[in-house]
Amino acid sequence: MLNNRKRRNNFTLLRALKVIRREIEMEFFGYTEELLQVDSPQPAKLPEVTISASPSELRALAHFLWASADEMEAKGNQFEHEHFEFDPGSNPALVVSNPDAA
């Protein structure tokens, strides 16, 4: 019974992802260590992003993304960007940016 339920949930998730993929227009941008060494660094478009994180870090990131989405919906194009800082001293920066920002 549990396996059937799990399969149904996975199937439902996969169907939802197929619908979402048709609507996704997000892009990933970032800096390499070399790019940060120049006088006026510009972010490069990244074809793939890998997140290496613990479960608690992933949950914190998920909470941040959810809260950012809520704020973006509430503020519309007045929401420009938000910084995620799990441990600002030693971790990479993550910035959520609104492509429709004014």
Image (cartoon, rainbow, N blue to C red):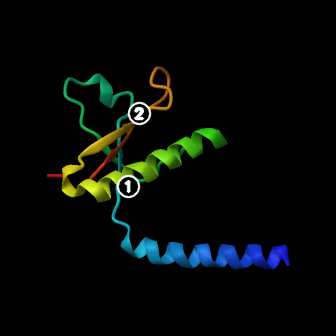
Circle 1 residue: 69
Residue 21: image location, x then y, percent: 44, 71
Q: Nearer the viewer, mark 2 or mark 1?
A: 1
Which residue is pictured at 31% across the width and 59% down the height? 73
The residue located at (52%, 72%) in the rendering is 17
Amino acid type for the residue under numbered disc 2: Ala
Residue 17 has which mark? Answer: none
Tell me if mark 2 has few (under 14), some (14-19) or many (20+) residues whose alpha carbon lies within 10 angstroms of its own. some
Amino acid carrying mark 1 in the image: Ala
Residue 71 in the image: state x and y as whole percent. 33, 51
Can you give x and y, in whole percent of width and height, for residue 59 in the image? Answer: 58, 45
Can residue 23 be spotted in the picture?
yes
Q: Decide: marks 2, 1 in contact (CB < 8 A)?
A: no
Which numbered disc flags the more N-terminal residue, 2 or 1? 1
- Which residue is nearer to you in this view: 99 or 82? 82
Residue at image location 67% in from the left, 73% down from the top: 10
Q: With respect to residue 90, does 30 lie above or below? A: below
Q: Secondary structure at mark 2?
A: loop
Kindly identify which residue carries mark 2: 93
Q: Is residue 15 left or right of residue 72?
A: right
Q: Position of residue 9 (x, y in %)?
A: 68, 74
Q: Residue furthest right?
A: 1
